[in-house]
Amino acid sequence: MEEWRTILLVSPDQGVSEAIAADLAAAHFKVVRASGEAEVSYCLQRTTVFSAAVIDMSLGERGLELLELMAEKLAGKPILALIPQADLDLAVRALQRGAYDYLLKPLLLEEVAASLAVLFDRPFQQQIDAARRNQWLRERYLQPVNSRESEMRRQMQLLGLLARTDAPLLLVGESGVGKTFYSRVLHFLSLRRFESLTFYDCRNKSGAEALLDLFGHSRGLFIRQQPGVLVLQECFRLALSVQNRIVAFMAEQEETAALGPGNGLRVIGTSMHLPEQAVDSGQASRHFRQAIAGGVIELPSLAQRREDIPQLADLFLSLLAGHFGLERKYLSDGAMRRLAESSWDDNVRGLQRTLIQAVVLSEGAEIEEQAIQTTAAEADGHLLQLNLSSFQLDRVEESLIGQALHHHSGNLSRTASTLGISRGTLYNKIRKYGLENLTKKGEFLVG
């Protein structure tokens, strides 16, 4: 048997392992099976040259460690991760640990052999090595919560399945549900993850301006024709003439797609309205609806997924502390109860803003109920506003420090204490963001 057809298959489930091994053998692969750490280590120390590996991630955290070991020992060889249903967080982490691609369960057995065949033609190792050296800086904060709510899980399963295709997609949901965030997740989960990702805001654009931006001779996003993903934010806000031009372009793209995955431009749209509603209201042509909505992901509002609020809150507080070097804060039972009972008209974005304010208003490590200000009437109108959907975290840090300084009337000692950082660190951050005007007069001396 040729070396390139030798596959290392790792799964703790004997039934799953036997079924996949049989299907791979029928596809003319030789399979070496392992069920755990000891067997994987033994296999990797043998003289057998593996051309690829498949790992069942039902092993959980231990599976991630094994995957990382396999990626190191099998450098340059594709690894396919089998992910539990709808667990996009685990899929993201598996790719960051060295997997080339993933399959979501329940899967068709023939998908494993077909996916491996594609990966043999996708030499990702140099990009993976570079991204890992850079600690996946661009993707570091892609941590989709493994939802407990059934409809969100259904949509995440659909997103995970469609991400692996090259079909145009539409993400639909209310303002603040995370359409931009899940566009980034979708891009990372696809085989285009190392290609460009570009966002274009379609709101408040005249037809002429949008045509120039998208199809202009020198700068048009469509004209550049570089392989990548283009996200049209609020795509149904485009003039009908521009929509028709995009439909024609996407028809041409079908010929490019015939050349194989990774060629041409993948188009993703976002909207607060379902495509049928956009057509009925006259915002979208039927041809554009058919072109842009090859698949539709409907993101539920936060009020429809209340069971996820504790996970979301804990994740965001952890990210806030880790990225900015702040004291890790925790929610009291009363604070968590108030979060769970709030209406959340502004969805996940509102939850993020509320938690930032809560960090500012809390002196100790525990966030009390009174620090949870979930309505505009409760919030201080002078506090800086911010948009977290784009994950521009320097803006978050600037806003957080600005809010804390405002809350403490520019007192540096109290601000530093609230944020859990030293006065020296606070000095440096104030200089970085030019916030000297918010400090107490005479307390900040420029050195």
Image (spheres, grey):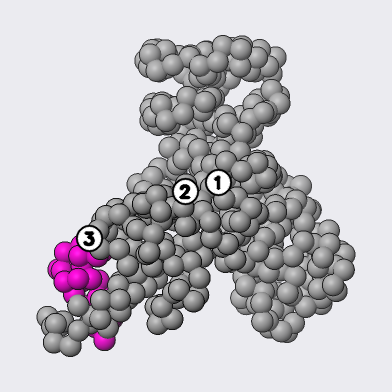
Q: Residue at x 61, y 33 (%)?
A: 85
Q: Residues within 10 Å of mark 3 (few under 14, many from 20)?
A: some
| Residue at the image position 19 percent from the left and 77 percent from the top | 411
Compare residues 173 and 301 and report the one nearer the observer: 301
The mark lying in front, picked from 3 and 1, is 1
Q: Which residues are magenta?
A: 412-437
Residue type beneath disc 2: Pro
Q: Position of residue 423 (x, y in %)?
A: 15, 69
Identify which residue, 91 or 144, lies in the foreground.
Answer: 144
Mark drawn on residue 272:
none
Question: Along the horizontal axis of the image, is 116 left or right of 389?
Answer: right
User: Looking at the image, do the residues carrying marks 3 and 1 touch, with CB atoms under 8 Å apart?
Assistant: no
Quarter of the rendering containing residue 291: bottom right
Q: Which residue is mark 2?
A: 310
From the top left corner, tell me how far across and down residue 126 is, in percent. 44, 43
The majority secondary structure of the magenta stretch comes to helix
Q: Secondary structure at mark 1?
A: helix
For the residues carrying marks 2 and 3, which lies nearer the camera in this image? 2
If the image is split into quadrants, where does the N terminus sit?
top right
Q: Residue 93's x, y, as percent? A: 46, 40
Residue bearing the label numbered 1: 307
Q: Amino acid at mark 1?
A: Glu
**Among numbered discs 3 and 1, the one appearing first in the sequence:** 1
Residue 435 in magenta?
yes
Q: Which residue is mark 3?
A: 420
Q: CA distance from mark 3 to mark 1?
A: 30 Å
Is the residue 216 above or below the residue 263 in the image?
Answer: below
- What whole-number distance in Å separates the C-alpha atoms at marks 2 and 3? 23 Å
Kindly indicate the quadrant of the structure image that contains residue 161.
Answer: top right
